[in-house]
Image (cartoon, grey):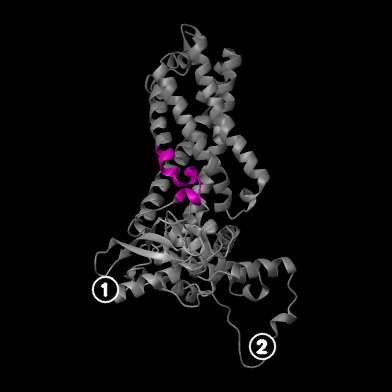
Amino acid sequence: MSGFFKSSIGRKVAMALSAFFLMFFLIIHLAVNITSVFSADVFNELSHFMGTNPAVQFALQPILLFGVVFHFVMGFVLELKNRKALGVSYAKNNGAANSTWMSRNMIYSGLVILAFLVLHFIDFWIPEINVKYIQGDMSGLHNGEFRYFHEMVAKFENPVRVAAYVVSFILLALHLLHGFTSAFQSMGSTAGRKKALQNFGKIYSFAIPLGFIIVAVYHHFNHH
Amino acid sequence: MSGKGMNLTLKIWRQKDAQSKGKMETYKVNDISEHMSFLEMMDVLNEQLIAEGDEPVAFDHDCREGICGMCSLYINGEAHGPDRGVTTCQLHMRMFNDGDTIYIEPFRAAAFPVIKDLVVDRSAFDRIQQAGGYISVNTSGNTQDANAIPISKHAADEAMDAATCIGCGACVATCKNSSAMLFVGAKVSQYALLPQGQVEAADRVKNMVAQMDLEGFGNCTNTGACEVECPKGISLDNIARMNRELIKASVK
Protein backbone atom coordinates (compact mmCIF):
# COMPACT_ATOMS: atom_id res chain seq x y z
CA MET A 1 0.00 0.00 0.00
CA SER A 2 2.95 2.39 0.66
CA GLY A 3 4.01 1.85 -2.94
CA PHE A 4 0.54 2.90 -4.01
CA PHE A 5 0.84 6.39 -2.54
CA LYS A 6 4.22 6.84 -4.18
CA SER A 7 2.71 6.21 -7.62
CA SER A 8 1.30 9.00 -9.76
CA ILE A 9 -2.22 7.65 -9.32
CA GLY A 10 -1.75 7.13 -5.59
CA ARG A 11 -0.83 10.80 -5.22
CA LYS A 12 -3.94 11.77 -7.17
CA VAL A 13 -6.07 9.64 -4.87
CA ALA A 14 -4.44 11.22 -1.80
CA MET A 15 -5.08 14.67 -3.28
CA ALA A 16 -8.72 13.78 -3.87
CA LEU A 17 -9.22 12.29 -0.39
CA SER A 18 -7.87 15.43 1.28
CA ALA A 19 -10.02 17.51 -1.09
CA PHE A 20 -13.19 15.66 -0.08
CA PHE A 21 -12.31 16.19 3.57
CA LEU A 22 -11.69 19.92 3.03
CA MET A 23 -14.88 20.34 0.98
CA PHE A 24 -16.84 18.76 3.83
CA PHE A 25 -15.11 21.03 6.32
CA LEU A 26 -16.11 24.11 4.27
CA ILE A 27 -19.78 23.17 4.73
CA ILE A 28 -19.37 22.94 8.52
CA HIS A 29 -17.40 26.19 8.70
CA LEU A 30 -19.96 28.05 6.60
CA ALA A 31 -22.86 26.63 8.63
CA VAL A 32 -21.33 28.12 11.78
CA ASN A 33 -20.54 31.47 10.11
CA ILE A 34 -24.02 31.86 8.67
CA THR A 35 -25.55 31.79 12.16
CA SER A 36 -23.75 35.07 12.90
CA VAL A 37 -26.02 36.83 10.40
CA PHE A 38 -29.13 35.68 12.26
CA SER A 39 -28.11 35.46 15.91
CA ALA A 40 -25.06 36.68 17.77
CA ASP A 41 -25.98 34.37 20.66
CA VAL A 42 -26.10 31.21 18.56
CA PHE A 43 -22.81 32.17 16.91
CA ASN A 44 -21.24 32.76 20.32
CA GLU A 45 -22.47 29.43 21.68
CA LEU A 46 -21.23 27.52 18.64
CA SER A 47 -17.88 29.33 18.66
CA HIS A 48 -17.42 28.59 22.33
CA PHE A 49 -18.26 24.94 21.83
CA MET A 50 -15.93 24.61 18.84
CA GLY A 51 -13.20 26.56 20.60
CA THR A 52 -13.24 24.67 23.90
CA ASN A 53 -14.55 21.16 23.22
CA PRO A 54 -11.56 18.81 23.64
CA ALA A 55 -12.70 16.50 20.83
CA VAL A 56 -12.86 19.42 18.40
CA GLN A 57 -9.68 21.06 19.66
CA PHE A 58 -7.41 18.07 20.10
CA ALA A 59 -8.80 15.55 17.62
CA LEU A 60 -10.59 17.33 14.77
CA GLN A 61 -8.40 20.44 14.66
CA PRO A 62 -5.10 18.55 14.23
CA ILE A 63 -6.72 16.36 11.54
CA LEU A 64 -7.95 19.49 9.78
CA LEU A 65 -4.54 21.17 9.99
CA PHE A 66 -2.93 18.03 8.62
CA GLY A 67 -5.51 17.90 5.81
CA VAL A 68 -4.88 21.53 4.84
CA VAL A 69 -1.08 21.23 4.96
CA PHE A 70 -1.14 17.90 3.14
CA HIS A 71 -3.35 19.24 0.32
CA PHE A 72 -1.04 22.22 -0.20
CA VAL A 73 2.23 20.34 0.05
CA MET A 74 1.01 17.55 -2.25
CA GLY A 75 -0.30 20.19 -4.66
CA PHE A 76 3.14 21.78 -4.84
CA VAL A 77 4.90 18.42 -5.13
CA LEU A 78 2.65 17.42 -8.04
CA GLU A 79 3.09 20.80 -9.73
CA LEU A 80 6.89 20.53 -9.52
CA LYS A 81 6.85 16.94 -10.80
CA ASN A 82 4.58 17.94 -13.66
CA ARG A 83 6.81 20.85 -14.63
CA LYS A 84 9.73 18.43 -14.77
CA ALA A 85 7.72 16.17 -17.10
CA LEU A 86 7.28 18.96 -19.65
CA GLY A 87 9.54 19.30 -22.63
CA VAL A 88 10.53 22.56 -24.33
CA SER A 89 7.57 24.98 -24.16
CA TYR A 90 5.44 25.32 -27.25
CA ALA A 91 5.86 28.50 -29.29
CA LYS A 92 2.10 28.45 -29.69
CA ASN A 93 -0.22 26.60 -27.31
CA ASN A 94 -3.98 26.92 -27.40
CA GLY A 95 -5.04 25.56 -24.01
CA ALA A 96 -8.44 27.23 -24.18
CA ALA A 97 -9.33 25.00 -27.15
CA ASN A 98 -9.57 21.90 -25.01
CA SER A 99 -9.78 22.71 -21.30
CA THR A 100 -11.14 25.25 -18.82
CA TRP A 101 -9.10 28.06 -17.31
CA MET A 102 -9.91 26.70 -13.85
CA SER A 103 -8.50 23.26 -14.63
CA ARG A 104 -5.25 24.69 -15.98
CA ASN A 105 -4.66 27.13 -13.12
CA MET A 106 -5.38 25.16 -9.94
CA ILE A 107 -1.90 25.99 -8.62
CA TYR A 108 -2.61 29.74 -8.89
CA SER A 109 -6.11 29.63 -7.39
CA GLY A 110 -4.56 27.39 -4.72
CA LEU A 111 -1.81 29.91 -4.01
CA VAL A 112 -4.37 32.70 -3.51
CA ILE A 113 -6.30 30.46 -1.12
CA LEU A 114 -3.05 29.71 0.73
CA ALA A 115 -2.31 33.44 1.03
CA PHE A 116 -5.85 33.94 2.31
CA LEU A 117 -5.36 31.20 4.90
CA VAL A 118 -2.26 32.98 6.20
CA LEU A 119 -4.34 36.16 6.65
CA HIS A 120 -7.19 34.13 8.15
CA PHE A 121 -4.87 32.46 10.67
CA ILE A 122 -3.37 35.82 11.65
CA ASP A 123 -6.89 37.25 12.03
CA PHE A 124 -8.55 34.47 13.98
CA TRP A 125 -6.61 31.32 14.67
CA ILE A 126 -3.42 32.77 16.21
CA PRO A 127 -5.31 35.20 18.53
CA GLU A 128 -7.53 32.31 19.67
CA ILE A 129 -4.54 30.06 20.40
CA ASN A 130 -2.91 32.98 22.22
CA VAL A 131 -5.90 33.72 24.46
CA LYS A 132 -6.79 30.11 25.19
CA TYR A 133 -3.50 28.27 25.44
CA ILE A 134 -0.87 30.95 26.12
CA GLN A 135 -2.82 33.31 28.37
CA GLY A 136 -4.86 30.33 29.55
CA ASP A 137 -8.26 32.06 29.40
CA MET A 138 -10.74 29.37 28.35
CA SER A 139 -13.81 31.33 29.50
CA GLY A 140 -14.56 32.85 26.10
CA LEU A 141 -15.67 35.97 27.98
CA HIS A 142 -14.75 39.62 27.68
CA ASN A 143 -16.25 42.05 30.24
CA GLY A 144 -18.67 39.28 31.24
CA GLU A 145 -19.95 38.67 27.73
CA PHE A 146 -19.00 36.16 25.05
CA ARG A 147 -16.26 37.82 22.98
CA TYR A 148 -16.48 35.80 19.72
CA PHE A 149 -19.18 37.72 17.85
CA HIS A 150 -17.74 41.16 18.65
CA GLU A 151 -14.21 40.09 17.75
CA MET A 152 -15.40 38.70 14.42
CA VAL A 153 -17.45 41.78 13.53
CA ALA A 154 -14.51 44.06 14.44
CA LYS A 155 -12.35 42.25 11.90
CA PHE A 156 -14.77 43.05 9.09
CA GLU A 157 -14.75 46.82 9.74
CA ASN A 158 -11.71 47.18 7.52
CA PRO A 159 -12.85 47.34 3.85
CA VAL A 160 -9.43 46.18 2.63
CA ARG A 161 -9.78 42.96 4.60
CA VAL A 162 -13.32 42.45 3.31
CA ALA A 163 -12.10 42.98 -0.26
CA ALA A 164 -9.27 40.47 0.30
CA TYR A 165 -11.79 37.96 1.61
CA VAL A 166 -14.13 38.49 -1.35
CA VAL A 167 -11.34 38.06 -3.93
CA SER A 168 -10.04 34.96 -2.14
CA PHE A 169 -13.47 33.37 -2.11
CA ILE A 170 -13.95 34.07 -5.82
CA LEU A 171 -10.71 32.17 -6.41
CA LEU A 172 -11.98 29.42 -4.09
CA ALA A 173 -15.09 29.17 -6.27
CA LEU A 174 -12.91 28.74 -9.38
CA HIS A 175 -10.76 26.17 -7.56
CA LEU A 176 -13.84 24.20 -6.54
CA LEU A 177 -15.39 24.39 -10.00
CA HIS A 178 -12.63 22.12 -11.26
CA GLY A 179 -11.74 20.39 -8.00
CA PHE A 180 -15.17 19.06 -7.09
CA THR A 181 -15.68 16.82 -10.15
CA SER A 182 -11.95 16.22 -10.53
CA ALA A 183 -11.83 14.57 -7.11
CA PHE A 184 -14.40 11.99 -8.18
CA GLN A 185 -12.43 11.19 -11.34
CA SER A 186 -9.22 10.73 -9.34
CA MET A 187 -11.00 8.30 -7.01
CA GLY A 188 -11.84 6.19 -10.03
CA SER A 189 -15.49 7.22 -10.21
CA THR A 190 -17.11 8.40 -13.42
CA ALA A 191 -19.85 10.07 -11.36
CA GLY A 192 -18.10 13.42 -11.79
CA ARG A 193 -18.64 13.09 -15.53
CA LYS A 194 -22.43 12.79 -15.16
CA LYS A 195 -24.58 15.88 -15.59
CA ALA A 196 -26.32 15.54 -12.21
CA LEU A 197 -23.11 15.58 -10.17
CA GLN A 198 -21.58 18.26 -12.38
CA ASN A 199 -24.57 20.49 -11.68
CA PHE A 200 -24.39 19.75 -7.97
CA GLY A 201 -20.68 20.59 -8.11
CA LYS A 202 -21.42 23.92 -9.76
CA ILE A 203 -24.04 24.79 -7.13
CA TYR A 204 -21.65 23.79 -4.33
CA SER A 205 -18.74 25.72 -5.89
CA PHE A 206 -20.75 28.93 -6.10
CA ALA A 207 -22.87 28.58 -2.96
CA ILE A 208 -20.10 27.91 -0.44
CA PRO A 209 -17.84 30.87 -1.37
CA LEU A 210 -20.90 33.10 -1.82
CA GLY A 211 -22.03 32.19 1.71
CA PHE A 212 -18.66 33.24 3.17
CA ILE A 213 -18.73 36.45 1.11
CA ILE A 214 -22.25 37.30 2.32
CA VAL A 215 -21.21 36.87 5.95
CA ALA A 216 -18.16 39.13 5.56
CA VAL A 217 -19.99 41.82 3.60
CA TYR A 218 -23.03 41.69 5.89
CA HIS A 219 -20.96 42.38 9.00
CA HIS A 220 -19.01 45.08 7.21
CA PHE A 221 -22.15 47.06 6.42
CA ASN A 222 -24.28 46.27 9.49
CA HIS A 223 -22.11 46.72 12.53
CA HIS A 224 -20.02 49.81 12.27
CA MET B 1 -11.31 28.54 -52.96
CA SER B 2 -11.35 26.24 -55.97
CA GLY B 3 -9.02 27.32 -58.72
CA LYS B 4 -6.66 29.45 -56.70
CA GLY B 5 -4.72 27.97 -53.82
CA MET B 6 -3.77 29.41 -50.45
CA ASN B 7 -0.56 31.25 -49.69
CA LEU B 8 0.66 30.34 -46.23
CA THR B 9 3.41 31.31 -43.81
CA LEU B 10 4.74 28.33 -41.87
CA LYS B 11 6.64 28.61 -38.61
CA ILE B 12 8.33 25.25 -38.12
CA TRP B 13 10.56 23.81 -35.39
CA ARG B 14 13.93 22.86 -36.90
CA GLN B 15 16.40 20.79 -34.91
CA LYS B 16 19.39 19.07 -36.49
CA ASP B 17 19.52 16.12 -34.08
CA ALA B 18 18.71 15.10 -30.51
CA GLN B 19 21.75 16.93 -29.14
CA SER B 20 21.29 20.22 -31.00
CA LYS B 21 19.31 23.17 -29.77
CA GLY B 22 16.42 23.78 -32.14
CA LYS B 23 14.58 26.93 -33.16
CA MET B 24 11.50 28.07 -35.06
CA GLU B 25 12.11 28.86 -38.74
CA THR B 26 9.77 30.66 -41.12
CA TYR B 27 8.86 29.32 -44.58
CA LYS B 28 6.39 30.33 -47.28
CA VAL B 29 4.32 27.95 -49.39
CA ASN B 30 2.09 29.13 -52.22
CA ASP B 31 -0.88 27.81 -54.14
CA ILE B 32 -1.87 25.17 -51.57
CA SER B 33 -5.13 23.40 -52.48
CA GLU B 34 -7.81 23.23 -49.81
CA HIS B 35 -8.23 19.54 -50.69
CA MET B 36 -4.68 18.66 -49.66
CA SER B 37 -4.06 16.88 -46.40
CA PHE B 38 -1.76 18.66 -43.99
CA LEU B 39 1.03 16.19 -44.72
CA GLU B 40 0.66 16.73 -48.46
CA MET B 41 1.18 20.42 -47.78
CA MET B 42 4.34 19.43 -45.87
CA ASP B 43 5.40 17.36 -48.89
CA VAL B 44 5.01 20.45 -51.09
CA LEU B 45 7.20 22.41 -48.69
CA ASN B 46 9.83 19.67 -48.65
CA GLU B 47 9.97 19.43 -52.45
CA GLN B 48 10.43 23.19 -52.49
CA LEU B 49 13.24 22.93 -49.91
CA ILE B 50 14.96 20.12 -51.82
CA ALA B 51 14.73 22.13 -55.08
CA GLU B 52 16.36 25.04 -53.27
CA GLY B 53 19.11 22.77 -51.96
CA ASP B 54 17.92 22.98 -48.36
CA GLU B 55 17.40 20.19 -45.84
CA PRO B 56 13.75 18.98 -45.94
CA VAL B 57 11.72 19.04 -42.73
CA ALA B 58 11.68 15.64 -41.00
CA PHE B 59 8.26 14.50 -39.77
CA ASP B 60 6.73 11.12 -38.87
CA HIS B 61 4.09 9.54 -41.10
CA ASP B 62 3.15 6.11 -42.32
CA CYS B 63 -0.35 4.98 -43.30
CA ARG B 64 -1.78 8.44 -43.99
CA GLU B 65 -5.19 6.87 -43.31
CA GLY B 66 -5.53 7.94 -39.69
CA ILE B 67 -5.04 4.55 -38.07
CA CYS B 68 -1.33 3.86 -37.62
CA GLY B 69 -0.61 6.50 -35.00
CA MET B 70 2.67 7.50 -36.58
CA CYS B 71 1.96 11.10 -37.57
CA SER B 72 1.98 13.72 -34.85
CA LEU B 73 2.60 17.50 -35.01
CA TYR B 74 1.39 20.28 -32.75
CA ILE B 75 -0.35 22.62 -35.18
CA ASN B 76 -1.37 26.13 -34.16
CA GLY B 77 -1.26 25.17 -30.50
CA GLU B 78 -3.20 21.91 -30.76
CA ALA B 79 -2.18 18.26 -31.13
CA HIS B 80 -3.09 17.12 -34.67
CA GLY B 81 -4.30 20.67 -35.38
CA PRO B 82 -7.63 22.44 -35.06
CA ASP B 83 -9.93 19.69 -36.39
CA ARG B 84 -11.51 17.12 -34.03
CA GLY B 85 -11.30 13.33 -34.15
CA VAL B 86 -8.58 13.26 -36.81
CA THR B 87 -4.86 12.66 -36.97
CA THR B 88 -2.61 15.15 -38.77
CA CYS B 89 -2.66 13.04 -41.95
CA GLN B 90 -6.46 13.37 -42.04
CA LEU B 91 -6.42 17.09 -41.31
CA HIS B 92 -7.24 18.99 -44.47
CA MET B 93 -6.04 22.36 -45.61
CA ARG B 94 -9.65 23.55 -45.86
CA MET B 95 -9.36 24.09 -42.10
CA PHE B 96 -7.07 27.03 -42.89
CA ASN B 97 -7.42 30.30 -44.79
CA ASP B 98 -5.36 32.10 -47.39
CA GLY B 99 -2.74 34.25 -45.69
CA ASP B 100 -2.70 32.23 -42.45
CA THR B 101 0.43 31.77 -40.38
CA ILE B 102 0.62 28.17 -39.14
CA TYR B 103 2.80 27.08 -36.23
CA ILE B 104 4.10 23.51 -36.62
CA GLU B 105 5.90 22.00 -33.64
CA PRO B 106 6.83 18.52 -32.44
CA PHE B 107 4.84 16.78 -29.68
CA ARG B 108 6.49 18.08 -26.51
CA ALA B 109 7.21 16.13 -23.32
CA ALA B 110 10.36 15.29 -21.41
CA ALA B 111 9.51 11.63 -22.13
CA PHE B 112 9.20 12.35 -25.88
CA PRO B 113 12.66 13.70 -26.81
CA VAL B 114 13.05 15.25 -30.25
CA ILE B 115 15.11 13.12 -32.63
CA LYS B 116 15.13 15.58 -35.53
CA ASP B 117 12.90 18.52 -36.51
CA LEU B 118 9.33 17.32 -35.89
CA VAL B 119 10.18 13.69 -35.20
CA VAL B 120 10.01 12.64 -31.53
CA ASP B 121 10.94 9.39 -29.83
CA ARG B 122 7.70 7.82 -28.56
CA SER B 123 9.26 4.48 -27.59
CA ALA B 124 8.30 5.19 -23.97
CA PHE B 125 4.80 4.09 -25.04
CA ASP B 126 6.21 0.78 -26.33
CA ARG B 127 7.94 0.14 -23.01
CA ILE B 128 4.69 0.84 -21.12
CA GLN B 129 2.92 -1.67 -23.39
CA GLN B 130 5.65 -4.22 -22.82
CA ALA B 131 5.23 -3.79 -19.05
CA GLY B 132 1.74 -5.31 -19.16
CA GLY B 133 -0.33 -4.33 -22.18
CA TYR B 134 -0.98 -7.91 -23.26
CA ILE B 135 -2.55 -11.18 -22.15
CA SER B 136 -0.56 -14.39 -21.82
CA VAL B 137 -2.19 -17.05 -23.95
CA ASN B 138 -0.85 -20.52 -24.55
CA THR B 139 -0.65 -20.83 -28.31
CA SER B 140 0.00 -24.57 -28.33
CA GLY B 141 -3.02 -25.17 -30.52
CA ASN B 142 -5.46 -25.75 -27.67
CA THR B 143 -6.34 -22.07 -27.34
CA GLN B 144 -10.04 -21.48 -26.80
CA ASP B 145 -11.80 -19.44 -29.46
CA ALA B 146 -12.22 -15.95 -27.95
CA ASN B 147 -15.69 -15.74 -29.50
CA ALA B 148 -16.78 -18.75 -27.43
CA ILE B 149 -16.55 -16.71 -24.24
CA PRO B 150 -19.78 -14.81 -23.54
CA ILE B 151 -19.15 -11.08 -23.13
CA SER B 152 -21.86 -8.46 -22.64
CA LYS B 153 -22.42 -6.11 -25.55
CA HIS B 154 -21.77 -3.13 -23.26
CA ALA B 155 -18.38 -4.44 -22.06
CA ALA B 156 -17.39 -5.48 -25.58
CA ASP B 157 -18.22 -2.02 -26.93
CA GLU B 158 -16.32 -0.21 -24.17
CA ALA B 159 -13.30 -2.50 -24.60
CA MET B 160 -13.38 -1.88 -28.36
CA ASP B 161 -13.63 1.88 -27.80
CA ALA B 162 -10.55 1.73 -25.53
CA ALA B 163 -8.73 -0.48 -28.04
CA THR B 164 -9.11 2.13 -30.77
CA CYS B 165 -6.22 4.07 -29.16
CA ILE B 166 -3.48 4.22 -31.78
CA GLY B 167 -0.80 5.35 -29.33
CA CYS B 168 0.00 8.54 -31.22
CA GLY B 169 0.81 10.52 -28.07
CA ALA B 170 -1.51 13.47 -28.70
CA CYS B 171 -2.80 13.08 -25.12
CA VAL B 172 0.71 13.61 -23.73
CA ALA B 173 1.50 16.44 -26.16
CA THR B 174 -1.62 18.38 -25.26
CA CYS B 175 -1.51 17.77 -21.51
CA LYS B 176 -0.25 20.68 -19.40
CA ASN B 177 1.42 18.03 -17.23
CA SER B 178 2.69 15.78 -20.06
CA SER B 179 0.66 12.98 -18.51
CA ALA B 180 0.24 9.69 -20.38
CA MET B 181 -2.78 8.59 -18.39
CA LEU B 182 -5.26 8.59 -21.28
CA PHE B 183 -3.00 6.24 -23.24
CA VAL B 184 -2.30 3.98 -20.27
CA GLY B 185 -5.95 4.18 -19.17
CA ALA B 186 -7.07 2.97 -22.59
CA LYS B 187 -4.54 0.14 -22.67
CA VAL B 188 -5.45 -0.98 -19.14
CA SER B 189 -9.18 -0.70 -19.89
CA GLN B 190 -9.27 -2.75 -23.06
CA TYR B 191 -8.21 -5.79 -21.02
CA ALA B 192 -9.87 -4.89 -17.71
CA LEU B 193 -13.26 -4.97 -19.41
CA LEU B 194 -12.84 -8.48 -20.83
CA PRO B 195 -12.66 -11.87 -19.08
CA GLN B 196 -9.38 -12.69 -20.86
CA GLY B 197 -7.76 -9.73 -19.12
CA GLN B 198 -8.83 -10.62 -15.59
CA VAL B 199 -6.11 -13.15 -14.78
CA GLU B 200 -3.29 -10.63 -15.03
CA ALA B 201 -5.35 -7.53 -14.22
CA ALA B 202 -3.66 -6.56 -10.93
CA ASP B 203 -0.09 -7.02 -12.16
CA ARG B 204 -0.91 -5.34 -15.46
CA VAL B 205 -2.13 -2.06 -13.98
CA LYS B 206 0.63 -1.95 -11.35
CA ASN B 207 3.40 -2.61 -13.85
CA MET B 208 2.08 -0.30 -16.56
CA VAL B 209 1.58 2.59 -14.10
CA ALA B 210 5.04 1.96 -12.62
CA GLN B 211 6.60 2.05 -16.11
CA MET B 212 4.61 5.20 -16.97
CA ASP B 213 6.00 6.91 -13.85
CA LEU B 214 9.49 5.65 -14.59
CA GLU B 215 9.39 7.12 -18.10
CA GLY B 216 8.87 10.57 -16.56
CA PHE B 217 5.33 11.35 -17.66
CA GLY B 218 3.49 13.84 -15.44
CA ASN B 219 0.51 13.44 -13.13
CA CYS B 220 -3.01 13.80 -14.50
CA THR B 221 -4.95 16.75 -13.06
CA ASN B 222 -8.17 15.97 -14.94
CA THR B 223 -8.19 18.98 -17.25
CA GLY B 224 -9.76 16.77 -19.92
CA ALA B 225 -7.65 18.29 -22.72
CA CYS B 226 -6.47 14.82 -23.83
CA GLU B 227 -9.98 13.56 -24.46
CA VAL B 228 -10.75 16.61 -26.64
CA GLU B 229 -7.57 16.33 -28.70
CA CYS B 230 -7.51 12.52 -29.00
CA PRO B 231 -8.00 11.60 -32.68
CA LYS B 232 -9.84 8.43 -31.60
CA GLY B 233 -12.06 10.07 -28.99
CA ILE B 234 -10.74 7.92 -26.13
CA SER B 235 -12.92 8.75 -23.11
CA LEU B 236 -11.67 10.14 -19.81
CA ASP B 237 -13.70 7.29 -18.27
CA ASN B 238 -10.71 5.09 -19.11
CA ILE B 239 -8.51 7.11 -16.74
CA ALA B 240 -11.09 6.70 -13.98
CA ARG B 241 -11.16 2.95 -14.70
CA MET B 242 -7.35 2.77 -14.50
CA ASN B 243 -7.43 4.63 -11.16
CA ARG B 244 -10.06 2.17 -9.93
CA GLU B 245 -8.05 -0.81 -11.18
CA LEU B 246 -4.91 0.42 -9.40
CA ILE B 247 -6.79 1.09 -6.15
CA LYS B 248 -8.30 -2.42 -6.42
CA ALA B 249 -4.92 -4.02 -7.19
CA SER B 250 -3.22 -2.16 -4.31
CA VAL B 251 -5.69 -3.03 -1.54
CA LYS B 252 -5.61 -6.73 -2.44
Image quarter of residue A108:
top left
Q: Which residues are magenta?
A: A95-111
Q: Label 1 sits on what residue type?
A: Asp
- Residue B29 in the image: state x and y as whole percent: 37, 65
Q: Looking at the image, is A96 positioned above or below residue B81?
A: above
Return the x and y of residue B22 as percentages of the image width and height.
27, 64
> Is residue B238 on the magenta stretch?
no
Q: Identify the residue at image location x=49%, y=51%.
A: A97
Q: Along the polypeptide, which appears first: circle 2 or circle 1?
A: 1
Name the quadrant containing residue B241: bottom right
* Number of the label disc, if any, that sits on residue B54: 1
User: What residue occupies the far left of the structure in this picture?
Assistant: B20
The one nearer the camera, B22 or A67, is: B22
The label on residue B64 is: none
Chain under numbered label 1: B
- Residue A36: where, in percent of width, then height? 56, 17
Q: Chain of mark 2?
A: B
Residue at 45% across, 57% down: B78
